[in-house]
Amino acid sequence: MYTPYFMNNILTRIINIASIITALGLVFSLGGYFGFRYSQSSSPSLNKNTLSDLEVKQTETAKIVAKEVIGIQFIKANQERKCDDNHIIKGTYNSDNGNYYVKSNKNYDRIKPDICFATEEFARDTAGFLKKF
């Protein structure tokens, strides 16, 4: 029986597309199967020993205390943005860098600091802030 050329071409394309879809389905299903098996095998099981180890680590990390940095006063989120008497240099952050203001600056009283420094040298040399005039 004779089939025209364009029919053979269409049938060949359909068969090629079906075989590609079948191969992709097989690859994804095997990936899902082995991925699931791997995720199940690598997850740690929690038992009494693991839980007691976690409790020990929690108590060890609770003992860590942040040391106070001399020469700097951090402004906390809920704290009033005001420098104390020991840290009179006001520092602010912007997108490019940090700036600091001394009492001789004309805007000093209007500045709401993000951080306060004890000395101008600490703000400039250690923290890398730039002086605003």
Image (spheres, rainbow, N blue to C red):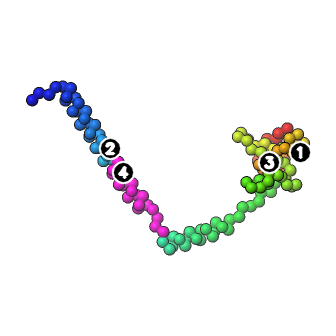
Q: CA distance from mark 1 to mark 2?
A: 71 Å
Instruction: Answer above or below: position of 44 versus 16.
Output: below
- Residue at disc 1, secondary structure: loop
Taking the spot 73% from the left edge, 41% from the top edge, the residue there is 94
Marks 2/3: CA–CA distance:
59 Å
Whole-number angstrom distance, CA of label 1 to CA of label 4: 66 Å
Q: Which sits earlier in the primary sequence, circle 1 or circle 2?
A: 2
Compare marks 4 and 3 and give the one earlier in the sequence. Answer: 4
Q: Main secondary structure of the magenta part?
A: helix
**Spatial CA span between label 1 and label 3:** 13 Å
> Are discs 4 and 3 less than 8 Å apart at CB?
no
The magenta segment is 28-46
Q: In the rendered structure, which amino acid carries the disc numbered 2?
A: Leu
Q: Is residue 107 above or below residue 65?
A: above
Q: In this image, 57 relative to 83: left or right?
A: left
Amino acid type, mark 3: Pro
Q: Which residue is mark 4?
A: 31
**Mark 4 falls on what kind of element?**
helix
Asked where in the image residue 10 lies, by quadrant, the reply is top left
Give the residue pinned by disc 1.
103
Answer few, some or many: residues within 10 Å of disc 4's Cα (few below 14, many 20 plus, some between 14 and 19).
few
| Residue in the picture at 35% in, 48% down | 28
Q: Which circle's residue, 4 or 2, is located before the other in the chain?
A: 2
Q: Residues within 10 Å of mark 2 (few under 14, many from 20)?
A: few
Answer whether residue 45 is magenta in the image. Answer: yes
* Residue at 74% from the left image edge and 55% from the top image edge: 78
Asked which quadrant contains residue 85, the reply is bottom right
The residue lying furthest to the right in this view is 104
Residue 24 marker: 2
The residue beneath circle 3 is 113
Q: What amino acid is labelled 4 in the image?
A: Gly
Circle 2 sits in a helix, a strand or a loop, which is it? helix
